[in-house]
Image (tube, helix red, strand yellow):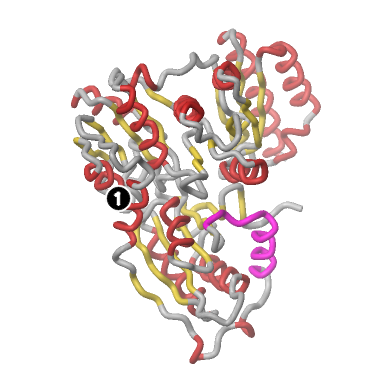
Amino acid sequence: MGRRYFGTDGIRGRANGVITPDLAMKVGQATGLLFQRGSHRHRVVIGKDTRLSGYMIENAMVAGFTSVGMDVMLLGPMPTPAIAMLTRSMRADIGVMISASHNAYEDNGIKLFGPDGFKLSDDVEGEIETLLDEDLGRRLSKSPALGRAMRVDSAQSRYIEFAKRTLPRQLSLEGLRIVLDCANGAAYKVAPDALWELGAEVFSIGVAPDGFNINHNVGSTSPEALVAKVREMRADVGIALDGDADRLLMVDEKGTVVDGDQIMAVIAQSWMEDGRLAKPGLVTTVMSNLGLERYIESLGLSMVRTAVGDRYVLEHMREHGYNVGGEQSGHVILSDFSTTGDGLVAALQVLAVVKRRDRAVSEVCHRFEPLPQVLKNVRFVDRRTLGQDSVIRAIDGGRERLGASGRLLIRPSGTEPVIRVMGEGDDRLLVETVVDEVCASLSAHSAALAAE
């Protein structure tokens, strides 16, 4: 059965369109009721990114949680992984991150973490959805049992210290010139401070949020600004986070972008050599490049693929005992440290390898030659598009043409009304042709269904 509210990464949509104050308040009430277990005073921690709508959603959720008797601890702008960590650290019953991640400022979202710091399971989200459609008026707290709300000023310093402790105590970043792009988002305060305190010379961009400019021509989805700044400052490395800092990409001293696949390769090999891999391999999604898979196998390791979404990577990691995983897009999960992707912590692990090897970032971070990979999006209004006979024939024909040495992946996005078409193989021209033909078929049928 399809879900009305939750997608692959919480609830997300246009602020004051999909994500309204009424919905946010109800999410607070439903989640608060579901996570009141035991007789202790229950508490929730709430963080957010820098979108203008964050104020509206935060206040609505405070009303919802306090109305069912939960105390609210407001952490202000903080990375998503910081909220996950602080949910555990502060013994909260639930953690909330108000963010639409890499989306533009017009969107916003609600991500929920359980008391263990992990994102909620599909089953628990289903229980919340059931409560959202019920009248909760009779389940609200009596006046003496209402919750309180308070701001926590120490949250940023607690996360900075946590991030720094993921490196060996004696390791310093002194001598490294780093350009850091915080996407005008949630990490604009904590990430520059953490790198500077570790000894690096830091040049920051994307650290002047105004409510509207999150992810706008900055951050991990727009690396051009970072590339230009790295070249301008003759920096050793560039680091770009996204709006809620749960993912990253890097740029070497030559201005070449280093994606999540290369970052995972660096960390996996380093941890293998140090005897830190819990299992001899890593977990990625179906989007990771075949070049990564071939490289990992050349190390004698295995690579497991899951559905797209860091939650599915993490679920497989937890179930099968892996401690390194992630996505090509830059969600890198290191479960020795975090319960979700953490862009800053992943970057620190790569910088540690750079310092130990005393080599240029271009040498450290170019572990394999990626196979040509083409990704295009087709907007749609009706999911029946994928079930059309001619669309199915186009997809099957494309897969046959790419053969065993290539891949064709078609999937509806969990966060946007688009179908993502990804082709990969040794022959770029063939890959582009196949992807274009599939996209043309999808577009034609989507338009036809929209006209019905």
Residue 294 location, x and y as percent? 59, 17
Q: Is residue 113 above or below residue 164?
A: below
Query: Which residue is located at x 59 percent, y 29 percent?
Result: 287
The chief SS type of the magenta part is helix
Res. 114 image quadrant: bottom right
Badge 1 is on which residue?
190
Q: Is residue 349 above or below residue 403?
A: below
Q: Is residue 332 above or below residue 114?
A: above
Residue 288 location, x and y as percent? 57, 27
Dot 1 amino acid type: Val
Q: Is residue 119 magenta?
A: yes
Res. 441 image quadrant: top right
Q: Is residue 176 left or right of residue 56?
A: left
Please state, as top left, top right, bottom left or bottom right, where the C terminus lies in the image: top right
Residue 236 location, x and y as percent? 25, 25
Q: How would you rate the neighbour count of disc 1 (Cα within 10 Å): few for under 14, some for 14-19, many for 20 or more?
A: many
Residue 334 location, x and y as percent? 49, 41
Q: For the view shown, which residue lies furthest in the right direction?
A: 389
| Residue 103 visible from this viewpoint | no
Q: Which residues are magenta?
A: 117-132
Q: Is residue 425 above or below residue 233?
A: above
